[in-house]
């Protein structure tokens, strides 16, 4: 694995290797001194052209705990606002001897394009509506910790599929790990072409959340991405919640202790009720701490290499 641009870049075996390293990294979180020397001398730039709380801060902490020098650049406040192109921006940054570039961009395919322009290792931290591979890895890692093997487990992904890079990466990742995946959305938020993709990739689709929930071993609620919606995809927020929200009533349809995931940020009261977000079986905050461990593991495998001192 030279870069991490898509879940297609990693095999099931490599995913399990990342998870094994993440488990070691998880232990670092509970230490008094949260520092490993693995990336000493390496420089990682977090280049974010879209807003982020979880991904950017966890990549920053991950790099710092691995002893890398970490620099954050966001489009607001950079020369991008003066009209500098993406290519000029990344080549300028990388001319300073950067080893790793973690980037988020609103354009699908941006990370792939950048990987062809620079020598630095590129990690896709979300490109438009395409992919968010480290989110899928941390989601699968979290679920595997709860369910054991994901082989044959039924994971139900619900919500705004059309605009979701999290859904696309998760379908690829969970399927690779042997899970049975069902995606649920209103017809207006089912991506076009999903019938042929689901047939080829072996996942199921449904418009009926109440029918699917009782067989779920895990449920993943997706954010309604109103900032990406040009028109009305549903009549009103209330109607969306009635049809597709994880409400208090729907919690009762789940088998006991079924993990409830949400990548965040959550629209409480729209796609997920507070009763579900804060339920004992909610793993939303665990996803965040797992995200840090998984991102440490990804940076370690991409940037340290086996010969580097101070390995995991
Ligand atoms: N899940 C996720 O990508 O969150 P942020 O936008 O806060 O990084």
Image (cartoon, rainbow, N blue to C red):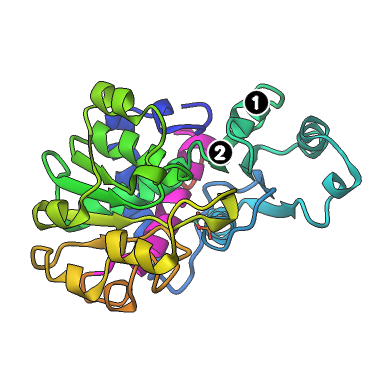
Provide the residue designation for mark 1: 113
Read off the residue under disc 2.
123
- The image shows residue 162 at horizontal and vertical percentages of 44, 42
| Magenta highlight range | 282-307
Residue 39 makes an appearance in the image: yes
Camera-side residue of 149 and 156: 156
Instruction: Give me the residue at 9% from left, 52% from top.
Output: 215
The quarter holding residue 195 reads top left
Which circle, 2 or 1, is nearer the viewer? 1
Give how far across and how far down residue 88 sits, in percent: 83, 32
The answer to whether residue 220 is magenta is no
Helix, strand or loop at label 2? It is strand
Q: Is residue 113 above or below residue 83?
A: above
Q: Is residue 144 above or below residue 4?
A: below
Relative to residue 46, is residue 31 depicted above or below? below
From the image, give the main secondary structure of the stretch colored magenta.
Answer: helix
């Amino acid at each position: 694995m030279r870069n991490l641009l898509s879940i297609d870049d990693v095999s099931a075996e490599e995913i399990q290797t990342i998870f094994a390293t993440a488990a070691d990294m998880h232990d670092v979180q509970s230490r008094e001194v949260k520092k490993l020397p693995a990336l000493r001398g390496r420089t990682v730039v977090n280049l974010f052209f879209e807003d982020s709380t979880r991904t950017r801060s966890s990549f920053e902490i991950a790099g710092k705990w691995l002893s890398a020098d970490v620099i954050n650049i966001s489009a607001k406040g950079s020369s991008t606002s003066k009209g500098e192109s993406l290519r000029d921006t990344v080549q300028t940054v990388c001319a300073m001897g950067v080893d790793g570039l973690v980037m988020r961009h609103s354009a699908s395919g941006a990370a792939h394009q950048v990987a062809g322009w620079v020598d630095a290792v590129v990690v896709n931290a979300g490109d438009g509506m395409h992919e968010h591979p480290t989110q899928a890895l941390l989601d699968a890692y979290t679920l595997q910790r709860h369910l054991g093997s994901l082989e044959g487990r039924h994971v139900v992904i619900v919500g705004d599929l059309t605009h979701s890079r999290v859904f696309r990466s998760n379908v690829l990742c969970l399927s690779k790990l042997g899970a049975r995946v069902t995606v649920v959305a209103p017809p207006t938020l089912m991506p076009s072409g999903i019938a042929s993709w689901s047939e080829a990739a072996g996942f199921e689709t449904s418009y009926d959340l109440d029918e699917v929930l009782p067989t779920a071993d895990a449920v993943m609620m997706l954010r309604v991405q109103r900032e990406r919606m040009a028109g009305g995809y549903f009549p009103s927020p209330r109607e969306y919640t009635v049809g597709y929200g994880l409400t208090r009533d729907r919690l009762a349809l789940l088998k006991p202790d079924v993990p409830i995931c949400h990548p965040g940020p959550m629209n409480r009261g729209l796609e997920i009720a507070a009763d579900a977000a804060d339920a004992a079986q909610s793993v939303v905050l665990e996803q965040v701490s797992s995200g840090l461990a998984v991102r440490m593991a990804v940076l370690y495998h991409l940037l340290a290499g086996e010969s580097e001192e101070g390995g995991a």
